[in-house]
Amino acid sequence: MIKRLVISLSSLIISVFLLMGGNTFVMTLLGVNLGLKGVEPTLIGSIMVCYSVGFVFGSLYGPKVIQRVGHIRLLPFSVPFWPVPR
């Protein structure tokens, strides 16, 4: 019983660690890349704040939208927005 609990929780903790590590890597890469391209620091900060706010709103409201609409119907709706951050 305890072994199964530890295995279940360890997979959850590892996935959260990977998600947070990936998000940190993207934020660092975004700031450095924009800085190398000569973008103003104020604009870099604004972009990074908007990314973080979008991440929080997506985390809070995404599951509710997926539960209401379903992931199959939500995926085609989100495809046109994929190139926006690129």
Image: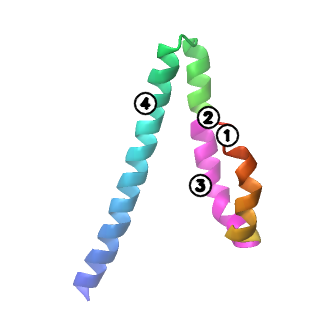
Q: Amino acid type of disc 3?
A: Ser
Q: Earlier in the sequence, mark 2 or mark 4?
A: 4
C-beta proximity under 8 Å, tags 3 and 2: no
C-beta proximity under 8 Å, tags 1 and 4: no
Residue 58 counted in the magenta span: yes
Q: What crowding class fits label 1: few (fewer than 14 Cα within 10 Å), some (14-19), or many (20 or more)?
A: few
Q: Amino acid type of disc 2?
A: Arg
- Residue on which the image places disc 3: 59
Residue 80 coordinates in the image, percent (x, y): 75, 47
Residue at the spot x=42%, y=45% of the render? Answer: 22
Q: Amino acid type of disc 4?
A: Thr
Q: Earlier in the sequence, mark 1 or mark 3?
A: 3
C-beta proximity under 8 Å, tags 2 and 1: yes
Q: CA distance from mark 1 to mark 4?
A: 20 Å
Which stretch appears magenta? 51-68
Q: Earlier in the sequence, mark 3 or mark 4?
A: 4
- Residue on which the image places disc 2: 86
**In this view, the mark in front (1 or 3):** 1
Secondary element type, mark 4: helix
Point out which mark residue 83 bears: 1
Front residue of 31/46: it is 31
Q: Quadrant of residue 45?
A: top right
Residue at the spot x=35%, y=54% of the render? Answer: 17
